[in-house]
Image (cartoon, rainbow, N blue to C red):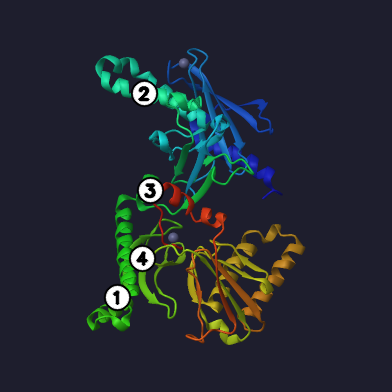
Amino acid sequence: MTGSGKENFFASVGDTVETIDHEKVHGLVQTGAADAEGHPVQEIASLCMNCHEDGVTRLLLTSIPYFREIVLMSFECPHCGFKNSEIQSASEIQEKGSKYLLKIENKQDFNRQLVKSESATCKFTELDIEIPPKRGQLTTVEGLLSEMVEDLSSDQPARKNLQPEIYEKIEDVIGKIKATIACDTTNGGVLPLTLIVDDPAGNSWIEYVPGEATHKWSHSEYTRTADQDVFLGLISEEQAAEARQRELAIKAAQEKIAEKSKNPSSSGFISDQTDIENFENEVQTFHATCSSCYAPCETHMKVVNIPHFKDVIIMSTTCDKCGYKSNEVRTGGAIPPKGRKVTLKVDDPEDLARDILKSETCGLVSPELNLDLTPGTLGGRFTTIEGLLRQVYDELYGRVFTQTSDSLESETKQRWESFFAKLQDAIDGKIKFTIIMEDPLAASYIQNIYAPDDDPNMTIEDFERTHEQNEDLGLLDMVTENYQHDQSPSTS
Ligand SMILES: [Zn+2]
Ligand SMILES: [Zn+2]
């Protein structure tokens, strides 16, 4: 990215401005001014929403460290003095929603910057204040609260006579917010204060200060619900209804799995077993929406029993329109207290036929093959070792040699070629290698062909999750905030 960054950067200024408003682009002038990093400031005459005279909108594309580029638009009217500033994120809706948490403990924390996109909800937990999605803003914690005070105050004179009771209540809230900003806890100020910015579009952000205590700031990503997809305009209400139906079916299957694990078949009634067997063999088909191109497609759901492991639900989707394929693996039950690391020495071509379940949260490493798949790289898969290596080959090969092959330096190209040659040897059973799977949710598995005896080539170790892993999985704010998270390791 860094090599060609400059060209991309200037291209994106143009693209972004073009997407803002075509009428505004007409008459756009370079001011010659720039921000500290040299980003040009452009301006354009535009109508004042307050007095309907001509004012000026300035546009600045700026990049926020550790986040991304945004466009700042600030309007100023010389006639009436009206000012307004907004941000427009220079990017589309992200694959996942995001949630940021900040513990505000002192005066300095109120200066923390934040980007609040037009789809974000901001919540100050202890003040019981929620700011619903509205215009996008680059602001600070204090800015957000001050604006709230301004908004609330503006209607107070009218309220004082018409609704005196509500007036009093709002006066209390205003006083509390002001005292909090002043860190004046003796006069109703609340500290520490928790701020949560939740953006289903994944385009919001709270500034992070490197090296600070880990409880102060956290970031997690989540899979959007169907309702959130509707809210963002990605799918229709009808498609959402289908998705809800699918989730209900998954939940029912998860409950059956949990029931079955509570009543092992040895002690169960015969009729129940028959019921469970039927349920295991059943394939259910649902209407779905392709998560890549949003075209209608079909999803098949099946419960698969993995011997000596557990029952899992496999949702397989193939999109006829764009060719997108996914195998989503869902497991039921509570989050296990520990993560699990499985190491297998593959020293016989027959090992390639072993089943492997790699959940989305699972990282996979093979030192001999120079292969390092971070969690999420390849989604969740239930296949064989050979099948998995083949998928890695196909997906990586496609990415490396179609999209960037022209710009690859010959040395890099050679490195990739030898990497793929080795991977092919592994697939063909010509070389020995090790597979190490580390899953913080212990939801991954490699078939033990000696079961129920131990597999001499396999080691299984349980490990304590690190703070970072808990953070990545969104388990931290689940504990502290009791937030609703999808507890099942969902993969796509
Ligand atoms: Zn004006
Ligand atoms: Zn598609």
For disc 2, the neighbor class at 10 Å (few under 14, some 14 to 19, many from 20) is few
- Tell me the SS state at disc 2: helix
Q: Amino acid at mark 2?
A: Asp
Give the labeled residue for mark 2.
172
Front disc: 1 or 4: 1
Q: Mark 2 or mark 3: which comes first in sequence?
A: 2
Q: Mark 1 or mark 4: which comes first in sequence?
A: 1
- Residue 342 x/y as whole percent: 56, 73
Front disc: 4 or 3: 3
Q: Disc 2, disc 3: CB below 8 Å?
A: no
Q: Mark 4 or mark 3: which comes first in sequence?
A: 3
Instruction: Confirm whether residue 331 shows in the render.
Output: yes
CA separation, marks 2 and 1?
58 Å
Q: Mark 2 or mark 4: which comes first in sequence?
A: 2
Q: Mark 3 or mark 1: which comes first in sequence?
A: 3
- Tell me the SS state at disc 3: helix
Q: Quadrant of ligand 2?
A: bottom left
Q: Amino acid at mark 1?
A: Phe
- Residue 8 x/y as whole percent: 64, 45
Tag shown at residue 279: 1
- Compared with 329, 149 (above or below) is above
> Most extreme residue toward the right, as rendered?
411
For disc 1, the neighbor class at 10 Å (few under 14, some 14 to 19, many from 20) is some
CA separation, marks 1 and 4?
20 Å
Give the labeled residue for mark 4.
298
CA separation, marks 2 and 4?
54 Å
For disc 4, the neighbor class at 10 Å (few under 14, some 14 to 19, many from 20) is some
Front disc: 2 or 4: 2
